[in-house]
Image: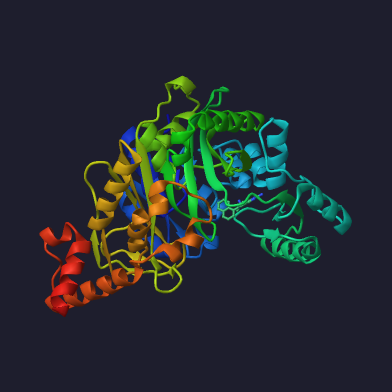
Amino acid sequence: MFRKVLVANRGEIAVRVIRALRETGIASVAVYSDVDRASLAVQLADEAAHLGPAAASESYLRIDKIIAAAHSHRADAIHPGYGFLSENAEFAEACAAAGIVFIGPPAAAIRQMGSKTAARQLAIAAGAPVVPGTVSAVTNLDDAKRTAEQLGYPVLLKASAGGGGKGMRRVDRAEDLEAAIRDASSEALRAFHNGDVYIEKLVVEPRHIEIQVLGDQHGNLIHLGERECSIQRRHQKVIEECPSPVMSTYPELRERMGEAALRIARAANYSNAGTMEFLVDRERNFYFLEMNTRLQVEHPVTELVTGLDLVQWQLKIAAGEKLTIRQEDVQWSGSAIECRIYAEDPDHQYLPSPGRITELTEPAGPGVRLDSGVYEGWNVPLDYDPLLAKLAAWGPSREAAMARLQRALSEYVIGGIRTNRAFFREILDDEVFRAGTLSTAFLDEFPGRRQSAKPDLEAEAIAALIGALAQKKPTAARRGNAAEWLKSGRESLFR
Ligand code: MV4
């Protein structure tokens, strides 16, 4: 096993990895930019290395600086976390060239999955279902028209080099195709320096379900089931859960999707942790979309339900150990739901809302897991993704998990900055969410169903006023149910 590991990331995921290292008796090295000097990750790690200015391009994305830090701190491996350099094949190769183990998949698998069309071709070759459409780029309008006609409108144009919804265009009629190809192609060119687009049949109101896989360097591969990630805003996941509510009704779907994910992983010679993204339509047909060759933000819900520690397994696998869990050993128990707590302003289109956290009370108790990267007094920088923490709850049933998550959210106090905390309280009360009939259209339709949005915002404002007038925090008894306290505060004010 490694003696010392450098964590090439920041925020809650750096903390997550440092915790795993501490549990395993491996020394940790945090890295930091100018604005992260006092970060929680730096405080928790055994050692820390300064990378440079706040801009990620001058710090967390600098392969040379990170490798130099690993050398000077004598780290024998690097964990990349998610984002930043985690899916950069050149970084994985640079680690190997420097004699440092990259804790992740082989560089070749990262590179192959980085091209959406290459991934699609691989899936087809592996016999896994993909959305009907083409694999090669559109070259002329007549061919494109014929393809779209054969697939049937609506179709979706996608960037070959894409991901994250950039360069995507829905086309409903043949006469709109030409302009849409032009738009999608120029957007793709700007975003990815590659204007190639291809055509897929549009899957209407799909569920977004992903399968977690884990493989060692000896050819052993297993899947750890699915995560339902349909609730997204602007291609940013907001809530994730395990199992998917649809699997509770159709358990054989997990087996079939798991098998498909493993076929693709085998074809890619994959090892370490990875995730296959699928769309699932109303008839429960599933289609491979793309693969994420990293540990994902939402991995805790899988850990809560399977009892496995994905980061511990990443370390063992990277160190060359064998996967000792067989597929039949994997068991799913109960239900877990996670919400991503962002520093963002609900009153201003959920734009990032950085600043100093002046008050922080974190939830805990039975079935609650908080992966946080912040503390009271921490200044949330504006330079990075505004994810503060992931709050997850486990329960023996989906209902129990929802109740625990609601309870935990009611205990969570984050002062000084705006967050999306109240938004989750509404989603968890929403009848469509509670019924589990989710799709990627959920958040588009959600505003129409919110009745309690206004009073809740009003209650928060009044609470702030009462707090300011009283010059004190809510008492422990009141804090137990912030919403009730807010209501009683309002009632007494208006009586
Ligand atoms: C689709 C689709 C419907 N039909 N492909 C969005 C991001 C990119 N990775 C793939 N995406 C989609 N591809 C076909 N053929 C709908 C989406 C999509 C989506 C997918 C996953 C999660 C959220 C989404 C939100 C809107 C659209």
What count of labels does the image hold? 0
Residue in the foreground of this view, choosing between 73 and 480? 480
Q: How is the image coloured?
A: rainbow
Residue at figure coordinates x 81%, y 54% from the top left: 138
Would you say 148 lies left or right of 56 here?
right
Residue in the foreground of this view, choosing between 295 and 348? 348
The correct choice, above or below, for 70 with respect to 350 in the image is above
Residue 119 spot, x, y in % from top left: 68, 41
The correct choice, above or below, for 419 with respect to 255 in the image is below
Residue 236 spot, x, y in % from top left: 50, 57
Residue 159: which quarter of the image? bottom right
Q: Is residue 14 visible?
A: no
Residue in the foreground of this view, choosing between 156 and 104? 156
Residue in the foreground of this view, choosing between 64 and 40? 40
Residue 380: which quarter of the image? bottom left
Q: Is residue 455 visible?
A: yes
Residue 322 spot, x, y in % from top left: 48, 22
